[in-house]
Every structure is written in C-alpha cells, then in structure tokens.
Amino acid sequence: MKHTFSVLVENRAGVLSRISGLFARRAFNIESLAVGITEDPNFSRVTIVVEGTDYTVEQVEKQLNKLIDVIKVRTIHPEELISRELVLIKVNAGQNERGDIMNIAEIMSAKIVDISRTTMTLELADTSERVDLFTELLRPFAIREIARTGIVALQKGTDTISVKK
Amino acid sequence: MINGAQAMVKCLESEGVSVVFGYPGATICPFYDSLSASSIHHVLVRQEQNGGHSANGYARIAGKPGVCIATSGPGATNLITALATAYMDSIPLIAITGQVATDMLGRDVFQEADITGAAEPFTKHSYLVKDVDQLPRIFKEAFYIAATGRPGPVLIDVPVDIQKKELSQPFSYPKQVNIIGYKPSIKGHGLQIKKVAEAMKAAQRPLICVGGGAFAADGYKAVRTLAETYQIPVISTMMGIGALPSEHPLYFGMLGTHGVPHANQAVHDADLLLIIGARVGDRAVSSPNIFSKDSTIVHIDIDPAEIGKNVGTSIPLVGDAKTVISQLMEFDPHPGDISPWLRRLRELRDRYHPDYTARSDGFINPKDFLHRLSQRLPEDAIYVADVGQNQIWSANHIAIQKGRFLTSGGMGTMGYSIPAAIGAKLAAPEQMVIAACGDGSFQMQMMELATICQDQVNVKMILFRNNKLGMVKEIQKNAYGERYIATNLDGSPDFLTLVSAYGIPCRRVSDIAQAEEAIEAFLSAQGPYLLECIVDPEESSK
C-alpha cells in the first residue's frame, strides 16, 4: 500500500541526504520524493510516497522523527489528501496528429507548452492517477520524453503541518 | 578577537570537559595549538579508533559526553568504528575532526574525506562548520544532543581555515539551546502509565528485563527500587548487566543466545514482561517465540522508534526510565502474591550449575577463573569485557556488585576493552578498572599499552590466550563442519615479552592451582598489570 508523508524540515545543506540515506539504509522504498521551500524560508517541505506495510510506515515516521533536522512528520490519510504532480511530455506530432493530441489535451485540461514541426510538449498538473491516464492516452503517438516531479501534498480543510509560532 | 580554535577550546571548557582523547594531524593543528594553553588534559592514543573507545569508556563512567579528536581524512575515517560502537550502545560522544580548508572542500585534496557524509549512519547528528561565529552554538547543541534523550555520538567537523579565522564578535557560550526539531520526551504519558500500573497489579508472574538504557540518567537505581519494592524478579540484557548486583536475590542473570537458562525460562513463563531501556536485539531474543503468547509486554524506552521494532508490544511507554518509574510508583502498582513465581525462579536458578571443573594440564578453566576473580574484586570495580568468547565468559561469570560492566554490546567491536578501560579509569581514578580480552582482540589494541605507560593509567588487563579466534572457531566447529580457516593465531608473539618491553609487570597462569596467588599479585599491583591465562582452544563459550 502507498502512504504519503509530509515532512517539515530545516532548510539547510545536507538534510535531503540525511533523509534519503535513512530510507536506503533501513530498506524503505521511496515511490516519489519532492522537496521545496515553505511559507517560511527557514523550512522546507518534503513530500514522500512510500510503498510498504503498516510496520514500515510506523518505522519511517519514527526514524524520520529522530533526525534532528526534521521538525514534523505527518502521514496524510488518503481521504484527506490533496495531491498534485506535474508532468511534462514530449510526443511525436506531425501535422496529421496535432488535432488528436490537442483534443486529448483539452479533455484532460493539459497545456501545450511547446511545439515544433515534428513534436509537441504538454504539461499537466493533476493527481498521479490522472497523470498516468494522460500518459497512456498519449502513448499511441510515440512519447519521446517524460519528466515527472513526484507528488506534493497538503491536507484538506483548515489543518496545517507547520511550525507553531 | 579570539580565533575559531581558541573558541573550540573555550567551548569545551564551558562544558566542563577536563580530559580529551585524540591524535593530531595537519588540519587539526590550530585546535591543538590552542589546547596547549588550556588545563584540559589530552591523552595521546595510538590510533584514532581507540581515542573514540576511550571517550566511550569515559562517558559511561563519568555520565557525561566523552570527547575524542582526530585530524581530517584517515584520522577521521579511523574514528568511524568507534562512532558506530558508541551509536549502537547509545553512548554520548563528541567527536571533533579537522577538515581541509573550506575553499578546498570537494576537490579531493590531501587528507580530505567527507566525514559527515561517511559517519551519517553512525551519528546522532553531525555538523560541518562553515561559519566561525556559529562554533559556540554548534558546540552547545552538540553536547546537548549527545547527552539527552537517547544518548549518542555527535560529530563536529571543523575546516582548518575556520579554526584560524577570528570571530567577528566577542566569545560568548550560549546558556540554552533551542533546536526546533529536537525535544526528547522525558515524562511518560499519563494514560500509558496507568495502563502499566493496572497490568502490574493484575500480574502473577511479572518480570523486569533491564537494558543499557537504564544506566543513562541513573535509571538503574530506579529499576532497583521498583524491583525491591514489589519483589519483582529482574533479568538483564548484556548491556544491562550490573543494573542490579549479580548476587542480588531478585537478579536472575542475562537472557539471550549466550545467556543463562533460567533467565530465558523466566522470559518464557512471565505473564508480564517490563522491558526497560533495552532494544531487545537479535542476540537477546534468540528465538521469536521466546515470549509466551498470552503475556503482556510493556516496553519502556526513551526512543519511540525502538518500541515495536524488534518485539511486539502490548503497552508502549516512551520516556526516561527514572522519571517513568517514579510516575509508575505513584500508583503503587503492587502485584498479587508472586511468591510462588519467585520460588520457582529460584529453584530454576539453583538447578543451574556453571561448569567450574578443572581442565587438562596446561589450561585454566576461564569461567572458574573469572568466578574466583569475582570473589576478590573490590565491590566498586569496573570490568570491561572485549568481544569474543571472553565476552560471554565475562558476562556470565563476573559478578558485579557496586561497579559496572562495560562492553561493546550492539556493535561487538573487537579491541574495545583496553582503550575503554583507559577512559573509564580517567573518569574514576579511585576505582579499580579491569580490561579482559582474548589474544585476537588484544592484538587489535595492543598499541594502547603505550598510552597506558605514557599517562600512567592504572588499568589491569586479563588476556585469555588460546592461540585462536575462539568465537569464530566455535562457529566453524558447530555450523561449518569443523572446517577451520583463518582462526589460527600462530604468528602471535610471546605476550609476556611484549608487555615487559613496555615495562608493564605481567605473569602467566596455566594451572588453576596458581590462580589465587596470581589474582592476588594482579589485584595488589600498584600500577598496570597483565595476567595471561592459558585457555584450551576447545573451550566453549557456554
């Protein structure tokens, strides 16, 4: 089962290496990891998706909490999860294919961000499942390149995972 | 303004550090230069790893972080085994390493090693100092992190240019730390405490299993009070030996693969097991079904990550052993009549007869020897066991009264005993300190005889000689069809000649009839002494 962790960390050098090192040495599998600065520039938020049993999840949370640079660890329950992932896809697109590709892009609310005589590059920010679906729809047109960010996530409603002032 | 190196020494002085263990090199020279102006005593070890072990022995006896120092590159990497040893046994250590200049970092220059990266899995936290003005904050945090919560080693890597650079403001050592991501919980959760108290009241066969965590913050005294107040029997892991005196009526020995049968039987039969400050690692829990299915397992530990990691727990309780036990005792958790249970355990213990029989000519029985030695030891003696068969003999046959039993429990690091004993002796000059090792482990640390001589450290050494790597040989015997390889130590020197070359008095015992006299000479020697005991290569650890 997949579990999504939102981890608030000190924004300093070496933190990401500590987190990834911990996952490697305790044999936790990372599905995706995304990191970026938060509303307070002193802190970063790392969103990690882990595949594993409940035991793994408990250990991930406890071991992450032991890192001095880690301020807060929260597992976000699937029902309260807002998650998005950004994908860029470059597909083969000659004159004959453009119409079909634009049609798919419109249905999926994707953006066309670049075009050349033989290719188009599309952008979609959506849930991982919708990104997967979008990729599958484009596959018949011969995908040349894909770049995915991994998911970032927040909780629904008013709750926040942030540093108490 | 003072420079970084002077600030580092001032930080150590502000922490009340009086002794450090180290080995200099080019990139740590500014620090050593300013150390010469301080009253802090520097012990020059003969290899950096031993500096780490000495700091470890010091920390365990002094009850505060031990400090070790190494230079960049190989000096720092030599420290790694000592850091890992301290990390596994939760020993507070401050390791200070020199580093190449900041503008050279990452260029693979002479004696450069990414030590904060390399030591990451074996340190509680680490710092690479890039701003000289941050030194006081970093030292303050490092000592705090090392000593509080679940203790452990903290590494401070200081580039040589930072040591030479002047501070931009007058030196001031912070009074407090504020680390937003580090707030260890000391007090136990009220509801959990209540649950444990209720489980204790309902128990008929309660048992305490105490681990090394009990020695942090003097928790072992609380464990003893808890056991004595409610007459609860106690067993220990190897790291927990000495939490109760070995001869205490409520103490039933060490559990696990190498433990005594009655301790393992007690774990199996208990209906309530209170694990206090123990990881309950694989060596302690020899088989997963050692716990009876319907027993209640309470796990008390300062580190939430240990609870539920190795053993399924019925009631988890996070907190400092001393605090949690005093919270628990407020409920007066008196179990019912447990005298039948105690009687049964005592019967089991009485049925256990260690093998103290004589061996064939030319060999002593090491278990008998240690038993005899125990009878003669001062009651506050500190005994440091190395790793190998000698560790198991020591764990099961040395009686600890008011002293301590130190060993590398988690990591099982050979070559631990003598340097750790040096550190322990410097922490407690009035107490007798004994290091026991085999001829394999002795040869991993015998360079420290020079440290003993140079600093006139009164450490008594016992060397069990069987000309073999006995523990590995035993494994080859039992699990690899007696195909012996790489366990023969035939190239070893005459140890008495070697030890004599250092001017350290020594003698050999190869007949148990000489044991009493040899022990007398050993214990009454004014300074360091080495006793070589000749052991049959076929002697087993059991």
Image: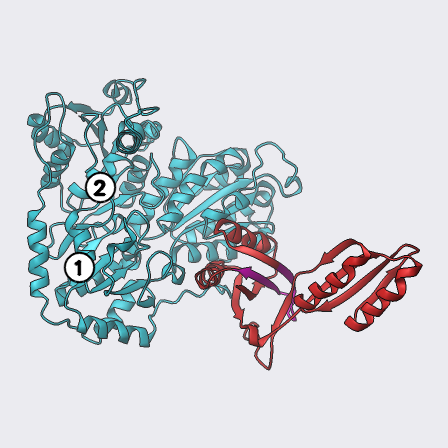
Residue B465 rendering spot, x and y as whole percentages: 23, 26
* Dot 2 crowding, Cα within 10 Å, few <14, some 14–19, many 20+: many
As shown in the figure, which amino acid type bears the numbered disc 2? Tyr
Q: Helix, strand, or loop for circle 1?
A: helix
Answer whether residue B401 is visible to the viewer in this image: no
Q: To which residue does mark 1 refer?
A: B269
Front position in the image: B151 or B333: B333
Cβ atoms at labels 2 and 1 below 8 Å apart? no
Residue A71 rendering spot, x and y as whole percentages: 52, 65
| Range shown magenta | A33-51
Q: Is residue B349 above or below residue A122?
A: above
As shown in the figure, which amino acid type bears the numbered disc 1? Asp
Label 2: chain letter:
B
Answer whether residue B29 is visible to the viewer in this image: yes
- The C terminus of chain B sits in image quarter: top left
Magenta segment includes A1 = no
The colour assigned to chain A within the rendered structure: red
Label 1: chain letter:
B
Magenta segment includes A42 = yes
Q: Is residue A127 left or right of residue B403?
A: right
Q: Helix, strand, or loop for circle 2?
A: strand
2 or 1: mark nearer the eye: 1
